[in-house]
Amino acid sequence: EIVLTQSPATLSLSPGERATLSCRASQSISGYLTWYQQKPGQAPRLLIYDASNRVTGTPTRFSGSGSGTDFTLTISSLEPEDFAVYYCQQRSTWPLVFGPGTTVDMK
Amino acid sequence: QLQLQESGPGLVKPSETLSLTCTVSGGSVSSSGHFWGWIRQPPGKGLEWIGSFSYDGSTYYKPSLKGRITISVDRSKNQFSLNLNSVTAADAAVYYCARHWEYWGRGTLVTVST
């Protein structure tokens, strides 16, 4: 089973700052990495699939990159609504796995 | 617009079976090329994929739950269901159904207690 590690666990930033979130896989998952945003009391929201493809409705300030084992989600300039928990997920092989999440909170 | 809605008991006794149903509207569980799944989230913790099925009927389960979990589909009702037997406190969570992975239900909280 593939293990996903996310770092940092918590990122404390101010609006307007750049956020860089990391997701590392225990073995190569090619580009089959998905990013989600989750706010309290809400279902996760799909942001980016296959490492770098924004879904319709994802603001362009969100970008994803990486392949193999190392992936990054970048939020170029944080808006107040971006403070949330972010999860990565691999779909390269079964079983599907989520990372433990990175909390982006307001400094 | 595709919508999913979870339903089922919010309280299950230890050792009994957790049964949830996901009702799909605005689309079909039989539509080609799509996967549908269940994800859970214990209170205050992260997301855990527990199982999925594909349009061709194949099922996939989290290995640690195999033997306890069954996902089934009722195409006539446009629903799919989760059965998890022999539950313990560790199975208490918000359970989400989803169509991989853009469309999610709002989630339903399941508590395990006597």
Image: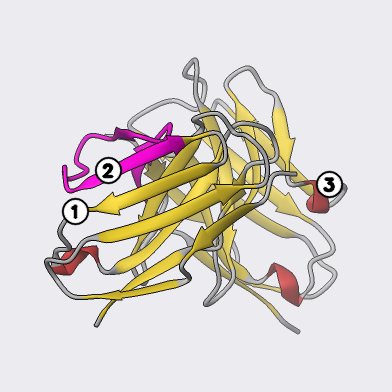
Position of residue A34 measured from the top left corner of the image (x, y, whole percent): 45, 41
User: What type is the residue that disc 1 sits on?
Assistant: Ser
Is residue A23 part of the magenta span, yes or no?
Answer: no
In percent of the image, x 55 and y 34: which residue is there? A68
Q: Are marks 2 and 3 on the same chain?
A: no
Subunit that carries the residue with mark 1: A
**Residue for point 49% across, 30% down:** A31
Residue, disc 3:
B66
Query: What is the secondary structure assignment of the residue under circle 3?
Result: loop
Quarter the C terminus of chain B occupies: bottom right
* Crowd band around label 1 with a 10 angstrom C-alpha radius: few (<14), some (14–19), many (20+): some
Q: Position of residue A90 (x, y in %)?
A: 56, 40
For the residues beneath circles 1 and 3, the answer to whether they share a chain is no
On what subunit does the disc labeled 3 rest?
B
Q: Which residue is mark 2?
A: A63
Q: Is residue A58 left or right of residue B59?
A: left
Q: Which residues are magenta?
A: A45-66
Does residue B79 appear left or right of residue B87 in this picture? Answer: left
Up the image or down, B59 lies above or below B30; here it is below
Q: Quadrant of the N terminus of chain B?
A: top left
Snapshot quadrant of residue A64: top left
Q: Nearer the viewer, residue A77 or B17?
A: A77
Q: CA distance from mark 1 to mark 3?
A: 42 Å
- Residue type at tag 3: Lys
Q: Is residue A30 left or right of residue A83?
A: right
Does residue A38 lie above or below B59 as drawn? Answer: below
Q: Nearer the viewer, residue B5 or A100?
A: A100
